[in-house]
Image (cartoon, rainbow, N blue to C red):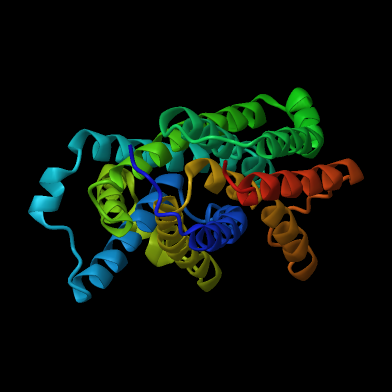
Amino acid sequence: MHHSSGRWRLGLALSLLTVFLWGILPIALTVTLQALDVYTVIWFRFLTSFVLLAVYLGVRGKLPTLQQLRSSSGKLLALATLMLAANYFLFMQGLALTTPTNAEVIIQLATLLLGLGGLVVFQERYTLHQWIGVSVLIFGYILFFNEQITNLLTARATYLFGSSLIALGAAVWAVYALAQKQLLQSLSSANIMLIIYGGCALLFAPFARVETIFTLDSLHLGMLLFCALNTLIAYGAFAESLEHWQASRVSAVLALAPIVTIISVELVSVIVPSLIPVEHLTLIAILGACLVVGGSVAIALEKSN
């Protein structure tokens, strides 16, 4: 089993960077999907990330060698690639059928599953205070989800279907993340992501409509480029955070992403009201968000026994 380096401050900083980038991503994706289909957006994000990362590693002389690739688990690399590709597809399809806030809330099942996986697969342990933090986090989610759950119970079939796709996407993402952490035994995080980006780009290439990219206006092209750079930086930061910190603690920090999404949606709706639909929070949801933050902090920063 892979063991973290113990540089928890670096792991925390990288996790927070990931939270910010993933928190604002649903807004950019919602705008991008107004002009492009799901397959083309996913293919472009992976291809751009692969090319930029390959150039960066090539300049620094850190591309993976054949010996490194042979020493790594091919089956585990294939599993990680397929699971991340499935996550992107399911999340994008679900996002197209629901809303940014709903998508970001449901996808947080991934962080809970990752935390559980860290405890089971990598034999990580929580202190009593951390288990209290887990309880606070879950209760906060229930309050935060309150309005979303009501929406789901009364929603039309397409909204329910979209939410189900996102939930499934959360499950396969947790499998990807656990595979990613184990692969760090034989490859660097950058080399792992390079292979995964390339593999995912190949998987979606047959379905991409490349010609539609050249018809985009400046707004949608800018959003598409932002989504691609977001993929490169956010997943790079996430992969590296797993090198330095326990998966269960990283997952606790990632639980803050919906808070960033909510704040971002509110800001965008004030600055550019016509860009995305306005979503209003109740006082109960705001209280739930505060509990999510408190629970995440308790889990992430409590010292281990």
Question: Where is the C terminus found, in terms of image quarters?
Answer: top right
Frontmost residue, 32 versus 262: 262
Question: Where is the N terminus found, in terms of image quarters?
Answer: top left
Position of 222 relative to 239 (above/below): below
**Number of numbered callouts drawn:** 0
For image coordinates 86% across by 45% down, the residue present is 287
Position of 219 relative to 120 (above/below): below
For image coordinates 8% across by 53% down, the residue present is 66
For this orientation, the residue located farthest to the front is: 305
The x, y position of residue 118, in whole percent, is 48, 35
Q: For residue 188, say whether it is visible.
A: yes
Position of 269 relative to 144 (above/below): below
For this orientation, the residue located farthest to the left is: 67
Residue 157 quadrant? top right
Q: For residue 273, say whether it is visible.
A: no
The x, y position of residue 184, in whole percent, is 30, 48
Residue 105 quadrant? top right
Left/right placement of residue 169 relative to residue 187 reads right
Position of 115 relative to 256 (above/below): above
Frontmost residue, 132 versus 147: 132
Frontmost residue, 254 versus 104: 254
For image coordinates 70% across by 61% down, the residue present is 264
Left/right placement of residue 266 relative to residue 77 reads right
The x, y position of residue 82, in whole percent, is 32, 36
